[in-house]
Image (tube, grey):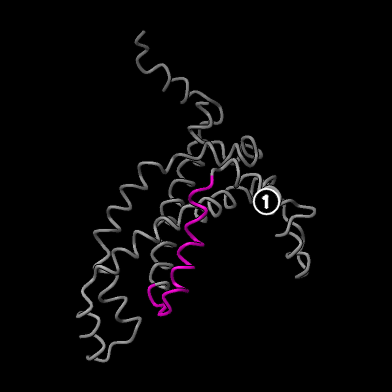
Amino acid sequence: QWIGFDNFTYLFKLPNFTSVLWNTLFIAVMKILLGLLVPIVVSILINEVKHNTLKRGIQTAIYLPHFLSWVVLGGIFIDLLAPGDGLVNQVIKALGGQPIFFLGDNKWFPFTLIVTETWKSFGYGTIVYLAAITGIDLSLYEAAQVDGASRWQTIRKITLPLLRPTIFTAVLLRLIDVLKTFDIIYSMTQGGPGFATETMNILSF
């Protein structure tokens, strides 16, 4: 049965629609920014590593979380971020700080969600950018070295401009799944504390 815009009408009339819209846009924008910035920076740093065995080891280590489901990672993060005996809070207390309830404080959980999601997915993006960097003509780097360019100048004038097509493609791919936050939120908090991460797809569920 065709219901027209009834679902949209229901959504707009919800009392917490404004906060849900804000949560959705905030998480989406931060996922796009970090999902692009972190892989680019890490891929450039890895490309500067000259030891091939070390380089392959780093690539493998950062790529492994991509294969783990959020059901597994959710349990791991619950233990690591526990306010009492969690490893992260033990380090914070050892440094003289106060324990933080990362998964139960509505001020901390949105950022915890974004950081953990970025940590899980940036390895895949790093591999993509590394493949693009290895495809750059080495004679360009040799010419820059002859001209006396520093490493930062080489990255800024050669590597980053030639990565633009790959970055553009990555942005389009990130836009496709940027709103997919259901699994991570339910794996770690069963919905998020204090509606801090109640997004459109959580609300529709």
Using the image as rendered, state which of residue 185 and residue 79 is in the foreground.
79
Q: Specify whether residue 59 is painted magenta.
A: yes
Residue 126 screen position, x and y as percent = 40, 61
Q: Identify the element where label 1 is drawn.
A: loop
Query: Residue 160 vs residue 205: left or right?
Result: left
Residue 183 screen position, x and y as percent = 54, 38
Q: Residue at x 56, y 52 (%)?
A: 116
Q: Can you identify the residue that label 1 sits on?
A: 102
Residue 32 screen position, x and y as percent = 41, 52
Answer with the quarter of the image where residue 98 lies.
bottom right
Q: Amino acid at mark 1?
A: Phe
Magenta part, dominant SS: helix
Using the image as rendered, state which of residue 24 and residue 181 is in the foreground.
181
Q: Residue at x 73, y 64 (%)?
A: 92
Query: Residue 152 vs residue 140: left or right?
Result: right
Query: Residue 120 vs residue 174: left or right?
Result: right
Q: Specify whether residue 73 is painted magenta.
A: no
Residue 196 screen position, x and y as percent = 60, 41
Q: Residue at x 67, y 51 (%)?
A: 102
Answer with the quarter of the image where residue 133 lies.
bottom left
Identity of the residue furthest to the front in this view: 53
Q: Residue at x 35, y 41 (%)?
A: 176
Identity of the residue furthest to the top in this view: 1
Instruction: From this view, report whether residue 11 is shown above or below residue 2.
Output: below
Using the image as rendered, state which of residue 55 and residue 23 is in the foreground.
55
Magenta segment: 47-68
